[in-house]
Every structure is written in structure tokens, then in C-alpha cells.
Amino acid sequence: MFMDRRRWLGDTPVSPDPRRVPVIPDRGGPCHGGMLIRGARVFDGRGGEPFGADVLIEGRMIVSVEASMEAPRGYEVLDASGMTLMPGLIDLHTHLSYHEPDVAISESQSLADGTLRGLERMRFYLESGITSVRDAGSHGDVTYRLKAWAADGRINGPRVFPAGQLITGTGGHGAEGVGPTSPALGKIREASGPVDWREAVRESFKRGADVIKVASHFSPPEIAAAVDEAHVLGLRVMCDAETHYIDWAVEAGVDSIEHPLPRTDEAIAMMADSGVAAVPTLIPYVIIFDQLGGYFNSTSRRFSFSKEDNLQVVSRMHRAGVRFGVGTDLVMDWFRYLPHAYVRELTLMSEAGLANLEILEAATLGGARILDMEDRLGSVEPGKLADLILVAGAPDRELEDLARVDTVIRDGRVEVADGRSLLPRGRAKTFEGITPPDA
Ligand SMILES: [Zn+2]
């Protein structure tokens, strides 16, 4: 059973992540001030039609959404007429440190390089309007540190919700052939037996995981032990699985099934009944089929599939009433296809039969729900964290317009303007002995 910490916390200020650790009350944060965004058409993330409204931000919070407002004195005013204002997009499946092709193993395994790879990718995500990423498996402590630095405003980038290392059975998905000279070393935690699966979950929790990532193969008792441990700790479980492993994962109570891999109608009905979400990640398989000709040499992909089959899986889940989130799983150097890779993921969901408003909800509030963060993120409502984007166009009519993200506000701060990452000038410290000349 999932132990929701919220019922014990009341109004206690907590960390802006699913761990919900009590924190010292926010005293306005790092010099945010206030801002009025005026004249936008607002898609508020909840799936309804956009409407005209002004949005007031104070510090890192949205405080008011009204038809028309005057800016309080001293507040910045952002004219958003002609644009669509919406919640920052959520990508539920990234790998920030994933190695790139054709580089030396020593570079691939280097945590310094892994951190720099993540930093570069965070810029691509942010400039694409993605203000939260759920990292589904990266090297060592890379994603935990990137999360902390972005949260402190020391680097620009989306919020990072790390899983840390991927947990799989010995030789399971991701661990196939992994040894001392593999670029994936440090990204995978192989586990064997229910006790060890439980221990692997605790290790991730100890390091700071916001979600537990598991992958086939596993036995029913192993996945049950992992899910039970994660849920008792208050963490959700995302699962990469296929075929009969999906049945076992859903029976064990995982929270989302990643990828569009083969599954039975019975498994789909079970997902719908028990509220297990789907994060289809269609776009990486388009790249895999179009550029690599197929998915080869993997013991966790022992089935036949195609781009069309994948769309069919999404259609069947949609018809059955399964909830969706959006993830792109851009491994290697595929982040360079952003923002189009994310937009294409959405248009593929449209080809599978989802309506545009449903898709945009999946990309925002739906994603926040899957992150267990719907009380803080995912919609344009008073009391939510101010993660917002301005789009030059109407993505509810043309999903492709989402490739034209003009402004990105994360935590109440403009981090992208005119489509480009803004790095504020470093704020100099002073004391009596070092006083700026204009003070
Ligand atoms: Zn992945």
C-alpha cells in the first residue's frame, strides 16, 4: 500500500519533491520579486479549453489567476498577448548522464563527464519548455547533484526528479553485458532475490531518489518486495517491462509502465482498473527503427515490434481508459533532437487517437500526478509553484506550435527569454571590507 506522507504533514513546509522532507519555511527565496503576466490565453493544465487571463507570481509561487489584474507597484509586467501561457512541460523519462556514441569508455564512465553531459542536456530540455524531468537512470550521484544545484538556482535547468540507478535482475534490462569496460557501469543496480530488491530500493532512497526505477527481468516476489518497500517509504515506482513482466508488475502495484512494448488486453484492463499510468516513449523507438533498423542484441526485447505496433499499444490503452504521461527517453546524443523530439512524441500520441487537450494535460498535470507532485506542479492555479511557459502559437490547436517556446519561468524566475537560456549575472557578496563603489 502506498503510504502518502501528505496526511501527516498538514501545512508543514516540505521539500519540492515527492520525498516531502520538512524544510525551513521559504522566506521568498533568492530575490525573486513579483511578476504579472498579462494578456495570455491560458491553458491551465487541467484539460479544459484555453481562456484569457492575467497571472500573478510572487516569489516562486502563482498567487492569482484572474480575467484582468493591475500589477502591484514594483512588480515586473510581462506582456504575453498573442501567446499561450501554460504549465511547464514534464518529461517523465530522461537519462541525463547517458553515454554518447563513439567516445572513449573512460569518458563515458567519468562522473565529471556525466555531470557535464547532464548540464548540457538540461539546457536543451529547459529551452524546449520542459521544466521538470524524471530521470530514469543515470550514473552514480550525477542526477542527485544536478537536482540540488538547479533547485538552489546555481544552474539553469528543469527540476530533476532522479531515480538514481536503475534496479534490475542480474543480467536484466540495462545490465546485459555490463562489465568493467561498459559505458553503462555505475548506472545499474543488479539485484537478486526479494531481500536484495528491497535493499536496492533502500539504497536509492538513502542516496536521495524521488522515484524508484525498476526493469525486467524479475520474479513476482522480487517486484512485489521492491514495490512494497518503495511505497512504504512514500516513493512511486516506474517500471520498464514487457510481455508477462507487465502482468507481474501491475499485480505488484507499480505506478507506471514505461515504453510501448507488447502486452495483452488483460494487462491493459488491469492497468486501467488499478490506475497504473502509461509513459509510452514512442519517439526513441522511431529513432531506433528509422536510424538503427531495429532493436538488436537485447534479451529484454525478445519479441517482434514496429512503429505501427507501438502506436497500436497506445491506442488500445487509450480506449481502455489508461492514464498517460509524456516521456521521451532520449538516450545517447538524441537530446539534440529537442524540442522536436518532445513535440513529435505528442503528435504520435495524437496519431494513436488522443485529443490535443488530453495530450497537453498528460504533458503537464498528468505528468505531475505521475510524479506524485500534483499538489505543487502541473497546473496554472494559485498555490502552485510558478513553472510556466509562453508559447508563440496555440498548441491546443496545433501541437507543433510547442516547438516555439518563447519564455520559460521556473520557480518564479525567467530562465529562458526569446527562446534562449538566460544566465543572470552572478550576485556579488559584500561585507564592510569589500563594498561596491556605488553602494
Ligand atoms: Zn529509459
Image (cartoon, rainbow, N blue to C red):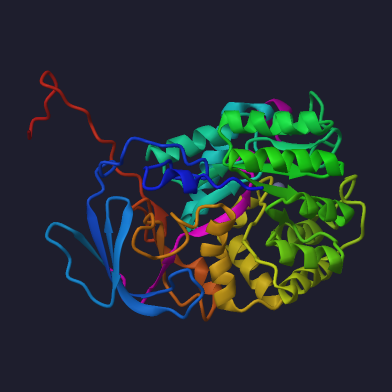
Residue at point 73%, 39% (across, down): 226
* Residue stretch rendered in magenta on the structure: 79-108
Residue at point 67%, 71% (across, down): 349
Residue at point 13%, 57% (across, down): 74
Q: Position of residue 336 (x, y in %)?
A: 60, 52
Vertically, is 393 above or below 127? below
Residue placed most toward the observer, 9 or 332: 9
Residue placed most toward the observer, 353 or 382: 382
Residue lying at the far front in this picture: please name it. 8
Q: Position of residue 327 (x, y in %)?
A: 63, 57
Residue placed most toward the observer, 19 or 368: 19
Question: Which quadrant of the figure has residue 293?
Answer: bottom right
Vertically, is 273 above or below 240? below
Residue 104 in view here = no
Q: Position of residue 169 (x, y in %)?
A: 83, 36
Report the number of discs.
Answer: 0
In this rendering, position of residue 34 left or right of residue 8: left
Q: Position of residue 78 (x, y in %)?
A: 26, 65
In this rendering, position of residue 430 left or right of residue 213: left
Viewport quadrant of the C terminus = top left
Asked whether 29 falls inside the magenta stretch, the response is no
Asked whether 93 falls inside the magenta stretch, the response is yes
Residue placed most toward the observer, 134 or 336: 134
